[in-house]
Image (cartoon, rainbow, N blue to C red):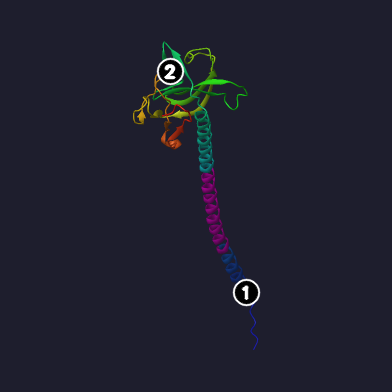
Amino acid sequence: MISYLTLPEAASAAHKTRHNEAGFTLLEIMVAMVVLTMIISTAFGALRLAERSWEAGLKHAGETERLRTVSAVLQRSFSQILALSWSENTKTHIAFSGDQKQLRFIAPAPQHHGATGLFEYTLVVAPHAGSNRLMLYYRLHDPDHIGFAADGSDRQQVLLVDELKTASFAYYGSPVTGDPAQWHAQWNTDAEAFPRLVHMRIVSPPEQGQWPDLFLALHTELSK
């Protein structure tokens, strides 16, 4: 049997249907907004994490490259140190001297300089703006001059490492022929031989990371 609704009943039923459909759609929208918010939050979190990882990678790559460059410059310079000496008042002096904060030697011209001949090098731990920096000075060597030239304005300079907490040098070898080789805090020009190794210890502020100790070998016939 077919049942018919009166006009008021039909209107009431239609109203209820529209009300139910509207409520269900609103719930879907709310759920979708919550899910979308979670997705966006997760995406921004991942993006920020990736950004921090990228920045850390660039910083590490920069520090690693700087370490590699400085190490290469020093290794090349020390491997080319010449076993030169000069005589003064019947006393022979070697062309090498150093203490915990500075050392001097003679080697060929810097690779980037484009000049020929021998140069006098001075590697210095110098105070600067409340910290320290590692500086390399060099000037053309005068073969007619006895000893190292006095410090002056004619020398060129290269900043190797900036903003250091501290840095120091030590020397391994036998200053006197026949003595056992050991580490020394200084090496004078009146030594009978060149050192075998120079130990360079660099300490940076904690936020910059730490440098590994550098051991620079000298390849001279007078190294004992």
Q: Residues within 10 Å of mark 1 (few under 14, many from 20)?
A: few
Q: CA distance from mark 2 to mark 1?
A: 121 Å
In the displayed structure, would residue 51 be above or below residue 133? Answer: below
Whole-percent x and y of residue 86? 47, 16
**SS for dot 2:** strand
Q: Which residue is mark 1?
A: 8
In the displayed structure, would residue 44 be above or below residue 181? Answer: below
**SS for dot 1:** helix
What type of secondary structure mainly makes up the magenta span?
A: helix
Who's the residue at 63% across and 75% down the image?
10
Q: Is residue 61 visible?
A: yes
Amino acid type of the residue tagged 2 in the rendering? His
Amino acid type of the residue tagged 1 in the rendering? Pro
Asked whether 180 falls inside the magenta stretch, the response is no
Asked whether 45 falls inside the magenta stretch, the response is yes
Who's the residue at 37% across and 28% down the image?
174
Task: Report the magenta residues as a range.
Answer: 27-54
Whole-percent x and y of residue 125? 44, 24
Question: Looking at the image, is mark 2 or mark 1 earlier in the sequence?
Answer: 1
Q: Which residue is mark 2?
A: 93
Q: As drawn, is 51 to the left or to the right of 124? A: right
User: In the picture, which quadrant includes the N terminus?
Assistant: bottom right
In the displayed structure, would residue 7 be above or below residue 138? Answer: below
